[in-house]
Image (cartoon, rainbow, N blue to C red):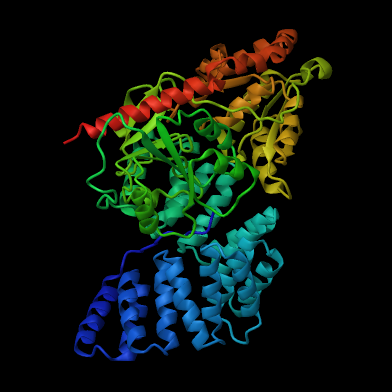
Amino acid sequence: MKKNTSICFKPIPIQSQADLDEKLSLLKQRPKDVQLSLETAVLALDSGQPQVAVNLMHRLSRQQPRLGIAHFTLGRALSAMDDWHGASDALTTALSLDPSNGGCCARLAEALLRIGSEEEAHLLARQAMALPVLAVESFILLGDVFKEVGDLEFADCALHKALELRDDGRVHHKLGRLFWSMKKFSQSTFHHRRAVDLSPEDALCLAGLGDALISIGDAESGLRLMEKAYSLDPGNKDVASVVAFAGNTDPDNNPEQYHRQCAEMMGRLFPSCPPAFSPRHDRNPERKLRIGYLSPDFRTHAMMHWVAPLLEARHSDEFEVMCFAEGGTEDRVTEHFRSLADRWFTTTGKSAAEAARKIASLGVDILVDLAGATAGNRLDIFAFKPAPVQVAMLGFDRSTCLQAMDWRISTALADPPGEVDRWSVDRVWRLETSFCYAPPTEAPEVAAAPVLKNGFITFGFLGNPARVGRVFMEAAADLLKAIPESRLQLLCREGEDEAHQSFKRGFLSRAGVDPDRVDFRPRVLPESRFLEYYSDIDITLNSFPADGGTTICESLWMGVPVLVLDRAEALRHTGRALLTYAGMSDWVATGIEDWVGLARGWNENPQALANLRRDLRGKMLHSCVCDAPRAVRAIEDAYRGMWRAWCGKT
């Protein structure tokens, strides 16, 4: 889980609020009392009211410009409000006044990192490590900075120095995240469990272990921890995002309850704000429109296959496209997206209000979210309503439950009219065609069907391991028992991953199936090398209860048909929709028995399976799933329809 950079306001204890009110009242009588001003600002920060602290420290730093602690406290408060540029300025001043202040040095390194000055942040963090006195909290901050700039050795050193000072749950949580990034998953889990043992009521520690469990497919255990974390810290954007994103992987989830829970979380996190766009926005329904796409994934990512066609096949005479990129990771895919956009901006390090003002100043007519509740999202920007029309699409296949989101674009087959319309906060615009999947340009050729060589059928799923949990593995055990000679291939994380594999093999063992019949392949790069795994798979089993999307398409492109279990209670029917659009509706099952029966039928006719494999890429290419002009025209027609509806409002 990414570092939370949102404003996290915890409920204020009544006594803390009373103490703060008392100090504010005293300050009215003694406005020049330096010590009282500082004490009140710190209490305001501890009470979750950083704006109060900012106001107090702005005044004090003007009164006492040489008082380093005033600038330092101002920097702390601005950091809590995500104003990283302001925090950087205040902390720079504080450090110039007190160069030996290790806490200030660590906080400035964090602020510099958030505004994109990674080299400067790294250098300053190294300098801070040499200072004589550092507190546990400073070592934690430095560990974060080192981790994010890729200096994992120093991150490990900083966090272990913190442990030497105090056996602390937060430090173990940070070590858990660090070892995760180092692909040392057993050590990571050890520290996450230790963190919860030491701090069972700490939301961050609970969330860390919950996130780790969800990632291996244990949604039931992981989500219970995440929900407890959210109850303790309902202002935490990252925890709420994981609950919203991973909720559909919980086999016990009730769709209506899920939507109500998400709506409550979004309403608390992002209360409605006055619109940031000008009330004089041009309401001409037929003019050229400015479309803004906001995403953390303009890079090598599954989303690149779906977003690129939107820019490549657009009608530039009707639509101007602006991209707003969140996150510091850039690569050759980023450069390609940058070349396709008419204008390019970054939201990294900017507060939601600052980014919203910028988007509004550019006159964006329709702002499109491509992330939803996935990692790195900026739903906080959408809450400020920087564009007259706001739309969610692609990156998150369910309602964002955000009041400021006007529409969600889906397809008629994935989101048939009905219950979802009652639960969604946003309105659903249903396309009569598929979104467009851009096939990988460097994919290997389709390999011969492995069943002909092996003499047995191999099933597989090469999508996110978090999507493969209890219900999938129990169904897979039924399938392997029904076809005794068959095998299963699954994806695991690259690195030491015994706990993950043991968790999934356990379901086979308990069902009386030899656990060695499942093989694990590590996720590898580049994409072309990863796609070679499909040469060993005969049939892909789509994940459930949470459908795959990109995994289905890449499998079909590699000649491997996909068997979909379409559960009536599913939040969305992505698998059924994609297979139908690809002309493969006969591969959709409506129950476990039907699912197993379809697999057995193909197992008994390996030559037919081999023939289908040979023709599947061409079938996919000529389907509407790969028809960019058709998909983009449908989406642009949706934009125009939404815009006309807004223009018609009084």
| Relative to 65, residue 511 above or below | above
Q: Position of residue 503 (x, y in %)?
A: 65, 42
In the orientation shown, which residue stands out farthest toward the right?
Answer: 453
Q: Quadrant of residue 549?
A: top right
Q: Could you tell me how many numbered marks the image carries?
A: 0
In the orientation shown, which residue stands out farthest toward the left?
Answer: 650
| Relative to 630, residue 355 above or below | below
Q: Quadrant of residue 172?
A: bottom right
In the orientation shown, which residue stands out farthest toward the front?
Answer: 317
| Relative to 599, residue 43 above or below | below
Q: Residue at x 69, y 64 (%)?
A: 152
Could one spot residue 169 in this view of the protein? no
Q: Quadrant of the C terminus?
A: top left
295 vs 127, left or right, is left
520 vs 223, left or right, is right
Q: Which is more toward the observer, 86 or 345? A: 345
Could one spot residue 311 in this view of the protein? yes
Q: Residue at x 52, y 61 (%)?
A: 205
Q: Position of residue 55 (x, y in %)?
A: 30, 76
Q: Position of residue 625 (x, y in %)?
A: 54, 21
Q: Which is more toward the observer, 361 or 14? A: 361
Q: Which is more toward the observer, 9 or 247? A: 9
Q: Quadrant of residue 412?
A: top left
Q: Residue at x 19, y 34 (%)?
A: 649
268 vs 325, left or right, is left
Q: Position of residue 170 (x, y in %)?
A: 54, 67
| Relative to 318, residue 499 above or below | below
